[in-house]
Amino acid sequence: MTVLLDGGGSLGLPVIPSFVAPEDWMAGTVTSYSSTTGVLVANIITVEGSETYDTWNIYRAPTPGTSMILVGTSVTSCTIGTGAKTITIDVGLDLVAGELIYIVYASQVGMNKTGMILTIASDQLADQTGQTWDVAVLVPYLNLFLLEVMNLKPDAYVPTQNITLVQGPSQALPVNAISLVDAVCNMGVSGATRGTPIQGVLKDSLDDLVPDWMTWTGDAVVQFVATDPRNPKKFWTFPPQPASPAKIECVLSIPPTPITSSDGTFPFDDSYIPAAVDYIVGRALAEETSIPNAMAKSTLFMNKFMQDLGLKTNQEKQDTDKGK
């Protein structure tokens, strides 16, 4: 692993790319190390970040200007901070008091989808602008991508969960849900007993077929769930729910949890990775008014983002209309 922790400064050590682990390391000297127990005590002088992690790589930096040497990994957690730090690492190492070491966060699974997306986007941006881009900027752009995808394709992230109904026909989605994708089945009052399946229907159709359906006697077993595309946060149950309503299992369109770091979980399937890269690059270029042709380049990447999702841009729609 070739990394540079001091930005190419006085030590001249290899550097961690900003898109991989910009704020997840500690530097200091060995206070003591037991080769039989693996207990390492270090006096930490310089840090980046404040997180707690379970896995760390320990690097030795024997000579300024030379590459660091990976000597071991931790088996206990540690919180980034200055002062005395104690962690348990591999046994049988030859670390001695006074040695300069770096303790660098190491993902247990290596670079995941999020890290790969940020890495590719950072490389693309460097090609376009000649500048490097920090993860502190790119991660928020990735979260904007998640929201944009949910706006354009609400079925991109559709977890299944129980909804507790209320008395009567009128029901509401959970506050974090965008829309109801499907009502699966009845789950009983307890929510633990899978029951009969539920049919979906448009509210206008149900109104035409059974005009007085909202006044029917309540029944905890739902036969139909009616929806109205003009009001996606609301749905109706038929028959209406009684005084002791039940629960139903539903597939919901819900915005995923925001990503907070380069090793966060990417919530969509792999087919969305190209779109994520193109969106991040396009969004970043749109902010760079000082770079020649940045906006034109941004437009190209944003158009590619739409194509990745299988959607037409406004210009493509206009060209199609002209061809009719």
Image: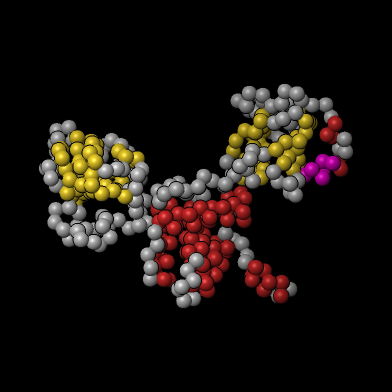
- Relative horizontal placement of residue 7, taking residue 273 as reference (left or right): left
User: Quarter-wise, where is residue 16 in the image?
Assistant: bottom left
- Relative horizontal placement of residue 165, taking residue 149 as reference (left or right): right
Residue drawn at 27 percent across, 36 percent down? 75
Residue 190 or 135: which is nearer the viewer?
135
- Can see residue 278? no
Residue 310 or 260: which is nearer the viewer?
260
Quarter containing the N terminus: bottom left
Quarter containing the C terminus: bottom right
User: Quarter-wise, where is residue 15 in the image?
Assistant: bottom left
Q: Is residue 49 above or below residue 122?
A: above
Q: In this view, does 263 lie above or below 305?
A: above
- Relative horizontal placement of residue 316, taking residue 118 as reference (left or right): right
Residue drawn at 14 percent across, 33 percent down? 36
Q: How many numbered marks are there?
A: 0
Residue 236 percent coordinates (x, y): 75, 37
Residue 207 percent coordinates (x, y): 84, 41
Residue 18 percent coordinates (x, y): 35, 57
| Predominant SS of the magenta segment | helix
Task: Determine if the magenta segment contains residue 45.
Answer: no
Residue 226 or 29: which is nearer the viewer?
29
Residue 74 percent coordinates (x, y): 25, 39
- Can see residue 302? yes
Residue drawn at 70 percent across, 38 percent down? 172
Q: What stretch is highlighted in magenta?
A: 202-207
Residue drawn at 72 percent across, 36 percent down? 171
Tell me which colouring the rendered structure shows: secondary structure
